[in-house]
Image (spheres, helix red, strand yellow):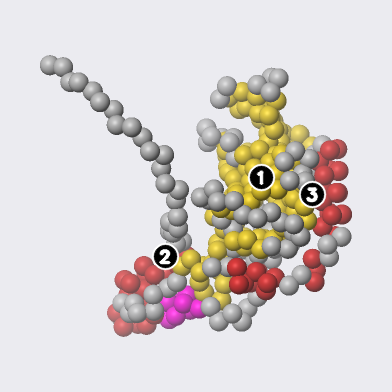
Amino acid sequence: MRHILLGCSLLLLNSLQAQDWYRGAFLILDQSGEVEVSDHLGVMHEAFPDSKMIRPGNAAISTADGGELLILNSNKVVLALEGAGELSYERFNQISDASKQTDVVSGKSRMILELKIGRLVIDSSRHAADSHIVLETPFGRLTLSMKSLLSISISENEKRKRFNLEIECSKGNASFVDRKGDQYKLYSGQRLSGYSKEGSLALGFSQLSDSSRSIFQQYDQRLSSLDLAQFDYEIFKPHMNLIWENDHSKDTLQEASDSSLRSKHPIVIEVAPPPVPTLPIRAIKRR
């Protein structure tokens, strides 16, 4: 019985060895206004003068007021950032066949994004494979279902000293969980909006606004003008670095099981910025 289990486990391990996790990449398709791109250590990169430069998905992007940015990711997810905004890729991983015989977009992907301020359109409706997308915000966490199209806006009202939040779902559905753990489920045609002031968050549901309908319409027109149906996603491959590789030398049941778990949910700490130096505190203990 042990030999049968061991054989099954090794068969599973061999099938997993054909796939590895790679860091995804992104391409700025179109832009207007001032754009800055830096990595997680704060190192600035050159601007995108011709909108043809591909970057690995570990970057932070900021746009100036009045700017617009259209981003195509290697997993077919499209992002559109509008106005003064701050967007960062916290994590962007994709599974790719080690034999390089399958196309880039055929495997699973995981994206963790963070939006601090600005308006962001997230479009996963073009992606046929399994794509898990999470967006972190100052208000809470937004999780998208597959094949969704939504817009999220975070703005500051300096006069009233509060931040406004608007989430509008055009296709699919999404789930939003605030910092207190309260969960809100959005479906196609719904709008979740409110504001945060002095630590309290007030949200309510309504129908899509006319302004959001216009935003989605402009987005569709802008995207259709680029004719992405003929886009060759293979150009992303040279920019997708391997972040996890299975160990082919493991040949026991326990090791195979551990490898299977790690290949499904790898925990990778790639690089972290150095901490801010602190001064020691001197104190006198009195008896």
Callout 1: SS: strand
Mark 3 / mark 1, whichever is N-terminal = 3
Q: Which amino acid does label 2 sit on?
A: Arg
Q: Quadrant of residue 160?
A: top right
Q: Percent position (x, y) of residue 220?
A: 84, 54
The answer to whether marks 3 and 2 mark residues whose Cβ atoms lie closer than 8 Å is no
Residue at (87, 54) in percent of width and height: 221
Q: Nearer the viewer, mark 2 or mark 1?
A: 1
Q: How crowded is mark 3: few (under 14 residues within 10 Å), some or many (20 or more)?
A: some
Q: What residue type is labelled 1?
A: Ser
Callout 2: SS: helix
Q: Which of 127 and 38 is in front in this view?
A: 38
Q: Which of 176 and 79 is in front in this view?
A: 79
Quarter containing the C terminus: top left
Q: Is residue 85 above or below residue 24?
A: above
Q: Nearer the viewer, residue 55 or 250?
A: 55
Q: Which numbered dot is residue 62?
A: 1
Q: Quadrant of residue 4?
A: bottom left
Q: Percent position (x, y) of residue 205?
A: 72, 34
Name the residue that disc number 2 marks. Answer: 262
Q: In this view, does 186 lie above or below 21?
A: above
Q: Which numbered dot is residue 109?
A: none
Residue at (59, 45) in percent of width and height: 114
Residue 15 lies within the magenta run: yes
Instruction: Using residue 280 as the reference point, say whether residue 9 is left or right of it.
Output: right
Q: Is residue 224 above or below residue 142?
A: below
Q: Which of marks 3 and 2 is in front?
A: 3
Mark 2 / mark 1, whichever is N-terminal = 1
Instruction: Using residue 284 as the reference point, say whether residue 242 is left or right of it.
Output: right
The part of the chain drawn in magenta is 11-18
Name the residue that disc number 3 marks. Answer: 32
